[in-house]
Amino acid sequence: MAKPQHIKLEEGRSSVIREVLYDPLCQFLYVVFHSNGAVYCYKRVNAELFQELVRADSMGRFFTRKIKPDHDAEPIDKDEWENFIDWARALSRDEIDAVFREKNDAWLKKLRNNPLALRF
């Protein structure tokens, strides 16, 4: 399974989006916006759509037209976001899966619905 992909955009790459993290397992796209640093999780974003976003000439325009209107979004607490980024960088997908296997089914179901609900 693929590891989450975290991309901090170079200065000038997008005036709308500061960084993104895509989790292919859950098909969640996390977007951090330049305007106020707000973080949102967009659900049911497939890998192809994520790759189109990354390759788009204007990521902000692509996001506004192709992702925002068609995918449910949930605001994410900024502190939880920082913890999640550290976690995503540190663990391989195999390590993440090993943690999942050690927990009970209810916890795993909750986590799959919202990975930021993870509490160690």
Image (cartoon, helix red, strand yellow):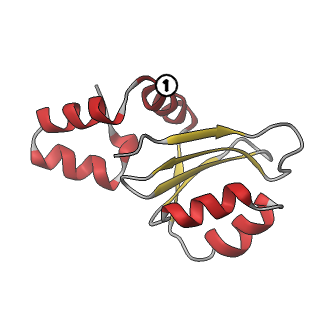
Q: Which residue is drawn at 36% across and 50% down?
A: 114
Which quadrant of the view contains residue 64?
A: bottom right
Residue 27 occupies quadrant: bottom left
Mark 1 Cα shell of 10 Å, populated few (<14), some (14-19), many (≥20): few
For residue 80, above or below residue 67: above
Quarter of the image with the C terminus is top left
Left or right of 15 on screen, residue 4: left
As rendered, which of 26 and 56 lies closer to the eye?
A: 56
Q: Position of residue 85 (x, y in %)?
A: 51, 31
For label 1, the residue is 86
Vertical side of 86 occupied by 34: above or below: below
- Relative to 96, 64 lies left or right: right
Q: In this rendering, would 46 be left or right of 65? A: left
- Closer to the camera, 17 or 95? 95
* Residue type of the residue flagged with mark 1: Asp
Q: Which residue is drawn at 86% across and 37% down?
A: 11
Camera-side residue of 65 and 2: 2
Number of marks in the rendered image: 1
Give the answer, above or below, for where 94 lies relative to 24.
above
The local secondary structure at tag 1 comes to: helix
x%, y% of residue 93?
34, 36
Q: Using the rendered view, name the quadrant where residue 44 is placed.
A: bottom left
Is 51 left, or right, of 103 in this rendering? right
Estimate the x, y position of residue 2 in percent, counting from the top left.
Answer: 40, 45
Residue in the image at 34% along x and 42% along y: 117
Residue 18 in percent (x, y) is at 74, 43
